[in-house]
Amino acid sequence: MDNLFIYLIILVILAIVVVLIYLVDKVNAIEGRGTVGELASQAAALITSAPSLDNGFNGLSGKKLWDTACGKAEPPLGIPELESFRKRYEPILNKHILGLIEDGGHDAAGGTSRSPQATRNISTLRANVESWLPPQHVSALYKAGYEAASNPADVPRIAQGLDETCTTLYARCDIDIGLPYSQRVFNDASSNNGGDSGASAAMLLEGPHADPAQNGVADAGAQAGDFEVDPVSR
């Protein structure tokens, strides 16, 4: 009888040991999952807080990029820094404008129309820059390209509106516009063709002229090696 009682005690003790081992394993497993989750959270936080790829504008993009070029940076930039910033920004502004005009011309040639977006990705040698322009000017630029391709006879009138829009954009950034955009885009069609309605959309939008008199704006960016802008492409 005593032996049976001892065996029962041993079995109870063994059962308790097995249960304890099981519980310890479960606790360790739970702690392990918690550690993994914590590490994952920390890694995600590091990725989120890491500085974005330098696009040549201290990571600025979209409307913040535009506001900074207009002198509305927070905190404000000093005069030398702002002038340097604007020299680097001019090729971005130029390509954004030309891209919108070309979009309008191509859509007119294809018989389609759309509402242009205020933001546009601009390719540079360093990175893609998200550019932003005020929506009312974006619509005006797209419309200029669309109407010029649709009604070549109206190019003189369209050219005047185009120049007003572009002059306003450059003035807001306090950048010298140089050669008027009507001459860059329409290749002097308004004067050479005398409003000939037979001029084709391809002729009117066959390619923008580069402006050699930009006071070194584009060249300054190129010399820096950061802001050479690819030809406008679709």
Image (cartoon, rainbow, N blue to C red):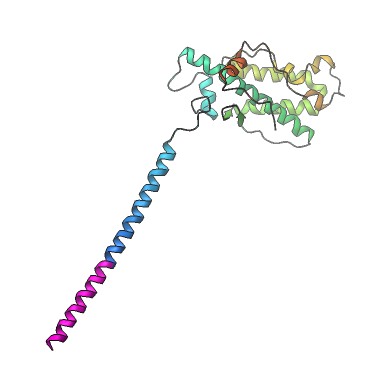
Provide residue 75's location: percent of width, then percent of height: 42, 21
The residue lying toward the viewer, choosing from 123 and 170, is 123
Total numbered badges shown on the rendered structure? 0
Q: Quadrant of residue 157?
A: top right
Of helix, strand and loop, which mostly describes the magenta segment?
helix
Residue 219 is covered by the magenta coloring: no
The residue lying toward the viewer, choosing from 106 and 229, is 229
Provide residue 20's location: percent of width, then percent of height: 24, 68
The range drawn in magenta is: 1-21
Q: Is residue 178 above or below residue 6?
A: above
Work out which quarter of the rendered image holds the N terminus and state it. Answer: bottom left
Asked if residue 172 shows in the view, the reply is no
Q: Is residue 74 above or below residue 8?
A: above
Q: Quadrant of residue 88?
A: top right
Residue 16 is covered by the magenta coloring: yes
Provide residue 212's location: percent of width, then percent of height: 68, 12
Q: Is residue 46 above or below residue 183?
A: below
Q: Quadrant of residue 211?
A: top right
Q: Residue furthest bottom?
A: 1
The residue lying at 79 percent from left, 33 percent from top is 109
The residue lying at 66 percent from left, 12 percent from top is 178
Whether residue 4 sits left or right of residue 111 in the image: it is left
